[in-house]
Image (tube, rainbow, N blue to C red):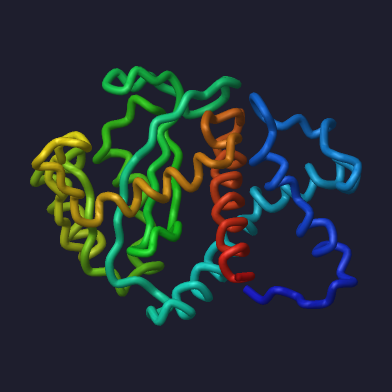
Amino acid sequence: MEVESDSSCPVLRVAYRLPVSWAKRHPVGPARWRELPDSFPPWQTIYAYHRRFCKHGVWEKLNTVLRIRLRLRSQRNASPSAVVFDTQSVKALCGGEERGFDGYKRVNGRKRFLLVDTLGLLLSVKVVPANTAETAAAMRGLETLSETYAGVSLAWADQGFAGAPFKTWLKDTLGWDLELTSGISKPGKPDFEVAPRRWVVERTIAWLCRHRRLLCDFERLVQVGIGWVYAAMTLLMVRRLAQ
């Protein structure tokens, strides 16, 4: 994906001012489009571009371009050879599609399946009902990635993805070996030990939750919710590249 550098491009002038930072700092609940500060263009224009970006996968493409640049700057290959994945259950406050009740975490809403590289940079996100099993959510999130990340050979996950059927499916479908991290004791205990690689995806979830719009799922459409996740990670990577 080529990013045009001409600052006179009207698409870029508007797109670069999409309300990602506003969504990060709004006090409670979702940022209402009509409450955008005067420094932004008209809210109808901002909303139209955001919906268009979500519909056509522009946020995901921007995420890919920026991730590759960050990996190359970190002396890594453009495409990862190992990944980490996990799920996050969040409340869905506006109804809509793909909803369920996670009995284990007591959450009525949706479950995000996140796939990241060893730097914690987002590779893929899939949203499913919260009552979907961990392994089923992983299958839905990974089933179409065999060609996208053909260089990956190893994946780390927690004990929620244990089980021979899922491990066999992952090997047969994607050619990935699955390594499960063991449980850890509570911080402050004498035997506390950080589980290898498991913290990477947990840290990414913490990065995303710094954007208050992602603490819950305020969107009726899954497509828009996924767009906000990619937009938040895009903002994070832009800041890193600007350093």
Residue 11 or residue 30, whichever sits in front: 30
Residue 45 or residue 159, whichever sits in front: 159
Q: Residue at x 77, y 77 (%)?
A: 5
Q: Residue at x 38, y 27 (%)?
A: 130
**Count of numbered tags:** 0
Residue 156 or residue 173, whichever sits in front: 156
34 up-or-down from 95: above or below:
below
- The quarter of the image holding the C terminus is bottom right
Quarter location, residue 189: top left
Going by the image, does 108 lie left or right of 24? left
Going by the image, does 243 lie left or right of 201? right
212 up-or-down from 193: above or below:
above
Q: Residue at x 80, y 64 (%)?
A: 12
Going by the image, does 214 lie left or right of 128? right
Indicate the position of residue 42 as horizontal and vertical percent values. 90, 43
Indicate the position of residue 47 as horizontal and vertical percent values. 78, 42
76 up-or-down from 45: above or below:
below
Indicate the position of residue 181 as horizontal and vertical percent values. 15, 49
Q: Residue at x 64, y 41 (%)?
A: 24
Quarter location, residue 223: top right
